[in-house]
Amino acid sequence: MHTRHLTEYDVRKYEDDIAQCYIDNLQIMDNQCTVDFTNRDEMYDYLFSLLECPESAVKGIFDDEEQYLFGLIIYDGIRLTDNGNAAQLHLATSKDLWGKDFHFVYEDELKDTMFDTLYCMIPAYCRPVVSLVKKLGFKKTGYIPKALPYISLKGEEKMYDELIYSWLKEK
C-alpha cells in the first residue's frame, strides 16, 4: 500500500471506492451535514473544492497496483510559516481494511509529513477513531461540549462532544 496526492481524474476513476469510504464511516459527517456521498455530484463538488483550495491537500491510500483506493487523508486549514506548519487532519478508511493492521499506512504518512502539528476533531462516541489516533501518537488536547448532532443507538438525535486530538512531530 502507498499514498499519493489525488487529482480530479482520480476522484472520477475511484468514485465508487471514495463513496464507500464515506458510507463505511458515516460518523465523519454529522447528522446535519449537507454533503451526501451517495450523490456523486455532491461528492465531486466537495472533493474538487478541497483539491482546488490552496489551504487543503488530499491524498489517497492505494493498493500497490492502484486498482483500489482504500482511504483518504485530507489536510485542511493548512498553515505554513517559517517557524512551523500545521493542518487539520481528516481520515476515511474503507471497511475492507478495518480489523487489519492498517494503521502502518498512517504511521508512514506521519513520518514523511511536512507538518509539525496536526490536529483532528472527533465525535466523542467514535471510539474506534479515538483508538486509531491514540495509536498514532495523538494526544487529547481539548473538547467542545455538545457540539455535534448524531443519531443515537436509540434512534434519537443527540448532541455529542467533539474531542480535539493533536500530534506534534518529533524533532
Image (cartoon, helix red, strand yellow):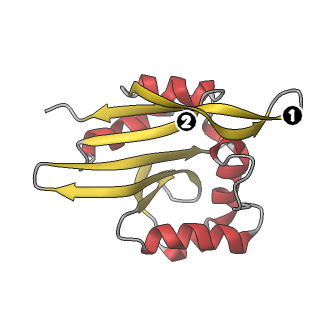
Looking at the image, residue 24 lies above or below residue 13: above
At x 36%, y 64%, the residue is 55
Q: Where, quadrant-wise, is the C terminus in this rendering?
A: top left
- In depth, the one of 13 and 170 nearer the eye is 170
- In depth, the one of 50 and 18 nearer the eye is 50
Q: Position of residue 47 (x, y in %)?
A: 55, 67
Is 120 displayed left or right of 81 in the figure? right
Is 135 displayed left or right of 71 in the figure? left
Identify the amino acid type marked 2. Answer: Ile
Q: What secondary structure is found at the residue carrying circle 1? A: loop
At x 23%, y 42%, the residue is 116
Q: Position of residue 112 (x, y in %)?
A: 26, 45
The mark closer to the camera, 1 or 2, is 1
Q: Position of residue 10 (x, y in %)?
A: 53, 70
Q: Is residue 1 visible?
A: no
At x 60%, y 26%, the residue is 128
Identify the amino acid type marked 1. Answer: Glu
Categorize mark 2 by other alpha carbons within 10 Å: few (<14), some (14-19), many (20+).
many
Residue 122's tag is 2
Instruction: State the residue position of label 1.
Output: 156
Is 7 displayed left or right of 36 in the figure? left
Q: Position of residue 78 (x, y in %)?
A: 33, 57
Residue extending farthest to the left is 82
Looking at the image, residue 169 lies above or below residue 4: above
At x 38%, y 57%, the residue is 77
Q: Earlier in the sequence, mark 1 or mark 2?
A: 2
Residue 48's tag is none
Quarter residue 67 falls in: bottom right
Residue extending farthest to the right is 155
